[in-house]
Image (spheres, helix red, strand yellow):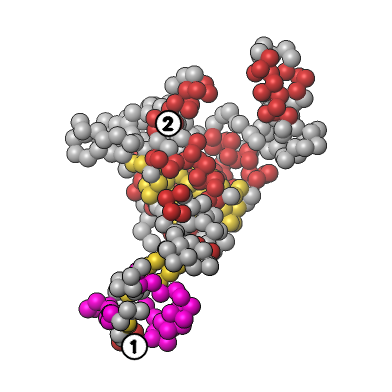
Amino acid sequence: MPTLHWIGKDKVINHHLDVPYKVLEHQYRFGLYEPSEFGNVGLTDLQEIEAAEILSSTNPKNPNSDNLHPNNKIIHGDNLEALKSLLPEYEGKIKCIYIDPPYNTGNESWVYNDNVNDPKIKKWLGNVVGKEAEDLTRHDKWLCMMYPRLKLLHKLLADDGAIFISIDDNEQANLKLMMDEIFGGGNFLVNIIWQKKYTQSNDAKYFSNTHDFIITYAKKINDFRINLLGRTEDQLKAYKNLDKDKRGPWMSQPIQVKTPSEAYIYEIKSPVGKSFLPPNGRSWQFSKERYNELVSDERIWFGADGNNVPRIKKFLSDVKDGVVPRSIWLHDEVGHNDEAKRTFKSIINSQTFDSPKPPRLIERILQLST
């Protein structure tokens, strides 16, 4: 398997082991208060009622609570230390991980701050990582930053879990090789293309960049089970009942295949006597005997007038309850950058974070993996 080498790799491979365990210090709680405790926090009556309802719904003292032991945590601090602090309680227990690391575009002003005991790496501390051609070690710094964090994330992930990582072209290729090394190439699931923009940039020099990637790996691919997506209205509209079949709505599909088999080349006659043979270089997808069984079961469709090329009827009642997700996620399905920024601003009324992700994107990830 190809491996990736960079400045400082030998120093950070085991750095996650050197990170000290720190106890999380609880500064405040969320979801554990009685509604009456909100009387003196300066909320309006309406806000107080809304807050009380939201918080009391996860209150362990509430007998109607669906979540008697809320484990939600917002951790403020260095993410490397935070990940290490989660290991004692959560190692091997996390079903889904999503991270949105710096893309290393040169415009993010991120700083390498890991305390690695190496003279070369110590020179990086506190310095903003520069742009391409300005900082010749920018990719080395990014890889050194990511490696120990991914090692800890691998430990936290459950055997049947999956990790999703947002990235763009600046580090996508490097991230893929690093993930192959840490998670194993055989556990690679998909490199999702997310359409982050719905407009075209005509002032782009070469191509209008409208997508990001979401690289996805399982902890153990044979243990991972992906959930299906519900069918959209357009997908359901494809199922009709043109012949009023008692089995309900269906859609028709071709019965010829590209890889021909001599035994599966035979003449088919429609109900009105029209003859059909598979196109040159193709054959039917089943034997003559199986075809006759399908005809008897009224699963072959020749069109309303009986003159069309034969197709097989696929009933909605026979297919899976949902659809397998595609590797391309369009903005109308899971949101886009502008939607994410508007949502973020509506919550915090500030644009302190340049690249939030739309809630619908995160919902899709959780829907598929948990």
**At 58% from the left edge and 50% from the top edge, which residue is drawn?**
370
Question: Does residue 299 belong to the magenta stretch?
Answer: yes
**At 72% from the left edge and 18% from the top edge, which residue is drawn?**
38
Q: Position of residue 122 (x, y in %)?
A: 43, 32
**SS category of the residue bearing label 2:** helix
Question: Callout 2: few (<14), some (14-19), or many (20+) C-alpha neighbours within 10 Å?
Answer: some
Q: Decide if residue 144 is on the left or right side of residue 280.
A: right
Q: Nearer the viewer, residue 271 or 314?
A: 271
Q: Nearer the viewer, residue 332 or 102?
A: 332
The residue labelled by disc 2 is 339
For badge 1, the amino acid type reads Ala
Q: Is residue 208 visible?
A: yes
Per the rendered image, the range of residues in magenta is 274-303
Q: Across the whole image, how many numbered discs are drawn on residues?
A: 2
Q: Position of residue 164 (x, y in %)?
A: 48, 46
Q: Are marks 1 and 2 in contact (CB under 8 Å)?
A: no
The residue labelled by disc 1 is 263
Q: Position of residue 239 (x, y in %)?
A: 44, 59
Q: Is residue 352 visible?
A: no
* 342 shown above or below 275: above
On the image, which quarter does residue 207 sit in?
top left
**SS category of the residue bearing label 1:** helix
- Pick whichever of labels 1 and 2 is earlier in the sequence: 1
- Considering the image in quadrants, where does the N terminus appear? bottom left
Question: Does residue 30 belong to the magenta stretch?
Answer: no
Q: Nearer the viewer, residue 258 or 273?
A: 273
Looking at the rendered image, the disc whose residue lies closer to the viewer, 1 or 2, is 1
Question: Callout 1: few (<14), some (14-19), or many (20+) C-alpha neighbours within 10 Å?
Answer: few
Q: Position of residue 202 (x, y in %)?
A: 21, 33
**At 45% from the left edge and 35% from the top edge, which residue is drawn?**
357
For badge 2, the amino acid type reads Glu
